Image (cartoon, grey):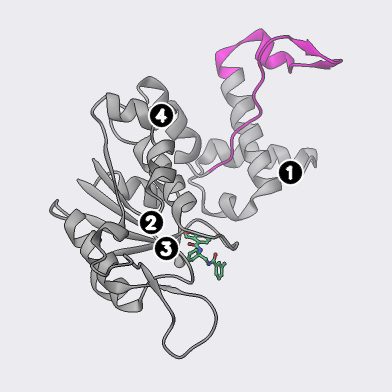
């Protein structure tokens, strides 16, 4: 997959993509990254990328010409998504990450100031995505969140662990608790079932804890999760034990 980021703070994105899983994805040839600055497409002497809003009021708006030229110079693949990161977008989730991971190219546009000129959104943007309901100063951190979630799904990025990790949210449940050595830490013992290591028992305990955690913390997720008969049995057990 080719990932392009359109941003007036290109270093912020470029530096972040040089680390960890994103760096490995590039080394493995699974992803190709490029960063583009609308300022390089400004034609005026001051290379302006923002201007005052029509109708007046506080704040600035990203000017359409340099932003549009930058996006148009960047889109190359058939079926490319042009994703605008915006608080007005659809909530980002794992389903959307999976869908985007199937594309040849993803162009991620980061807003600044009060946002982008409406005509750019109307004509060049194919997807509008939000990572959550809070106020930020720019779309760069949301763009990095999106890219991380998508790139780790590309074939050849995570290897074996990918299927395991995908499983954990593939069914829409929260994860069970995790433990590593020592078996006792500050008087707190690792649950016996995990120490004993009976695989079927471990699997059952983990599934039950996933269901319990999701029920307690994110009942909204549980309502939409793909549950089978075994899960319903475990849930019945949880409710009978009144640990919820
Ligand atoms: C009104 C949050 C404004 C913010 C209401 C999540 C937020 C992009 C995101 C804002 C942004 C709310 C996001 C706000 C984001 C233009 C530049 C928009 C930054 C900007 C809830 C500022 N997911 N915010 N406005 O934060 O880009 O993607």
Residue 205 on image: x %, y %: 64, 25
Residue 43 to residue 173: above or below? below
Whether pointer 2 and pointer 4 mark residues with C-beta atoms closer than 8 Å, the reply is: no
Q: Quadrant of residue 84?
A: bottom left
Tell me, yes or no, whether the highlighted magenta stretch contains residue 190: yes
Q: Earlier in the sequence, mark 2 or mark 4?
A: 2
Task: Single out the mark in the foreground, 3 or 2.
Answer: 2
Residue 151 on image: x %, y %: 35, 38
Q: Which residue is mark 2?
A: 8
Q: Quadrant of the N terminus?
A: top left
- State the separation of the CA atoms marked 3 and 2: 9 Å
Q: Which residue is mark 3?
A: 111
Task: Single out the mark in the foreground, 3 or 4.
Answer: 3
Task: Single out the mark in the foreground, 4 or 1.
Answer: 4
Mark 2: secondary structure: loop
Residue 12 on image: x %, y %: 44, 44
**Magenta stretch in the rendered image:** 173-201
Q: Which residue is mark 4?
A: 21
Q: Is residue 125 visible?
A: no
Q: Which residue is mark 1?
A: 239
Residue at 55% over, 14% down: 199
- State the separation of the CA atoms marked 2 and 4: 24 Å
Q: Quadrant of the C terminus?
A: top right
Q: Earlier in the sequence, mark 2 or mark 1?
A: 2
């Amino acid at each position: 997959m080719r990932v392009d980021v359109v941003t007036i703070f290109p270093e912020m994105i470029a530096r972040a993509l040089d680390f960890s899983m994103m760096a490995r994805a590039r080394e493995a040839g699974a992803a190709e990254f490029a960063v583009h600055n609308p300022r390089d497409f400004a034609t005026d002497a001051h290379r302006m990328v923002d201007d005052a809003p029509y109708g007046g009021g506080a704040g600035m708006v990203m000017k359409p010409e340099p932003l549009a030229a930058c996006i148009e110079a960047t889109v190359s693949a058939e079926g490319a998504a042009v994703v605008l990161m915006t608080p007005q977008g659809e909530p980002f989730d794992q389903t959307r990450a999976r869908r985007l991971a199937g594309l040849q190219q993803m162009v991620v546009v980061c807003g600044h100031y009060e946002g982008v000129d409406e005509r750019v959104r109307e004509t060049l943007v194919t997807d509008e995505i939000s990572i959550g309901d809070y106020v930020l100063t720019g779309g760069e951190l949301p763009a990095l969140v999106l890219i991380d979630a998508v790139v780790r799904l590309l074939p050849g990025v995570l290897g074996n662990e990918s299927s395991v990790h995908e499983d954990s949210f593939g069914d829409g449940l929260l994860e069970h608790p995790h433990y590593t050595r020592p078996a006792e830490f500050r008087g707190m013992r690792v649950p016996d079932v995990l120490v004993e290591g009976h695989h079927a028992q471990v699997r059952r305990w983990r599934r039950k804890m996933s269901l319990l955690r999701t029920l307690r913390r994110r009942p909204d997720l549980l309502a939409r999760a793909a549950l089978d008969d075994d899960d319903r049995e475990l849930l019945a057990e949880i409710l009978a034990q009144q640990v919820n």
